[in-house]
Image (cartoon, rainbow, N blue to C red):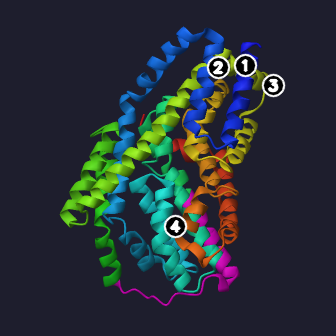
Amino acid sequence: MSDLGLSFAGLAAIVVLLILRVPVGVTLAIVSLVGIYQIVGVGTMWGILSTVPYDFVAHWSLSSIPMFLLMGYVCYHANLTEGLFRLARAWLSWMPGGLAVASVGAAAGFSAVTGSSLACAAAMGRIAVPQMLKNGYDKGLAAGTVAAAGTIGSMIPPSILLLLYGIFAEVPISALFIAGIIPGALTALNYCLMIVGRVVITPSLAPRVVDDAIWSERIGAIKETWPVIALVIGVFGGMFAGIFSPVEAGAVGAGLSCIIALLRRSLDWNGFKAAVTETMTSTAAIFVIAIGANLLTRFLALAGFTDWMSDTVLGGEMDQLTLMLGMMLIFLFLGMFLDPIGIMLLTLPIFLPIVEGAGISLILFGILMTKYLEVGLITPPVGLNVFVIKGIVGDQMRTETIFKGVLWFIVADFVTIALLLAFPQLTLYLPSLLN
């Protein structure tokens, strides 16, 4: 078998192993090592195995991943974000579908602290869904809103997906973070417009909430959220002002979150241990997948697959829009079965050479890819955010009800994607200001 044929066999083996539910990182590593062995022999294979994982994991930029994760978990266990929904409700409940709109706004704020879609969906699900159901909201709208709103965590900084992409693609993380602000805000805006539009047309979906908050309550809600405001300003204000680097920002955020939790006396020892344990577990899972993806990159390069793929795609004179739409279909399909980090690190070794060869901005591609992965979090049959919400609501509603509820949000996501593709400056304008 030729080296190129071996790469195709390896990719097929990856698909089979993933269908058999073998963990993504283990699958990528095993297939890559077997392929490298077949191409260059056992000596070189052991040489690559002994150097590549360490060289990648020891990359200084990766230290920001556990720090941002720790920041998010500390905020979660210290209940620093509890006031976000109350703040949004106090200011937005007067609108048609106000509680659902407030959930989207609160999720956007939560995302600016955690950077995790699943954590955002879990936190908002416990707070917002019971409130909406209590006020007579349609079950699909209530659960679908929170499941979809949780995906904003993948886009708004400090997005773990954007952080990993920046390290893997060697793109400045600060540029990626600031590039995600407008697309993230646009996603939230389109969600809110869709909710308001649906409720105006069908008022029974969301009965008007009699909750005329007086100004003292609204100001009090703002004061209640000072930890999140201070944390966001401290971390991202300092990073974009050049006081510290994006890598250092993770440590600053983790430190600030611990200090704020101590000042508020809202984090006990058990909560801190849980935050640290969850940080280590999540970091280890991410690193295993990243190592496997790095080994896959070496295997495909040795087999000549990346050069062949680039020549095949670019030789066909495919325009940038067609190329991006084709990649979108692949990401959406994979999103039905795999987690976002696994999808990203599985496909980057294949797609990055094509994107660079086509002259597409790596910043634009990173944002669009993240948006595609966001949609994958709520698409059946394995929409991870949907199952997070199902775990929270239990027997109150069926999984099919939640999936039906998110369909409208998927439509809103496609509108956002169309706007980002039609107007690249929505993504690239803010990063251009850093130059």
Task: Pick out the residue farthest to the right.
Answer: 316
Q: Name the residue under label 2.
A: 35
In the figure, residue 189 lies in which quadrant? bottom right
- Disc 4: CA contacts within 10 A as few (<14), some (14-19) or many (>=20): many
Q: Give amino acid for label 3.
A: Gly
Counting from the top left corner in percent of width and height, residue 182 is at 52, 52
Label 1 element class? helix
Query: Which amino acid lies under the numbered mark 1 shown in the image of this protein?
Result: Leu
Using the numbered discs, state the Cα–Cα distance from disc 1 to disc 2 in whole angstroms.
Answer: 7 Å
Q: Alpha-carbon distance for marks 3 and 1?
A: 24 Å
Q: Which of 159 and 192 is in front in this view?
A: 159
Label 2 SS? helix
Q: Quadrant of the C terminus?
A: top left
Prevailing SS of the magenta stretch:
helix
Rendered image: mark on residue 316: 3
Taking depth in this image into account, of 368 and 296 the one nearest to the observer is 296
Work out how far the residue at label 3 is from the one at label 4, CA to CA, in angstroms.
42 Å
Residue 365 picture location, percent across and down: 60, 38
Q: Which mark is residue 104?
A: 4
**Residue 291 at what x, y percent from top left?**
50, 30
Q: Sort mark 2 into few (<14), some (14-19) or many (20+) by Cα contacts within 10 Å.
A: many
What's under tag 4, amino acid-wise?
Answer: Val
Task: Bin the neighbour count of mark 3 within 10 Å (Cα to Cα): few under 14, some 14-19, many 20 and up.
Answer: few
Structural distance between the alpha carbons of marks 4 and 2: 46 Å
Query: What range is drawn magenta here?
Result: 187-215
Left or right, 269 with respect to 58, comes to left
Mark closest to the chain's N terminus, 3 or 4: 4
Q: Which of marks 3 and 2 is nearer the N terminus?
A: 2
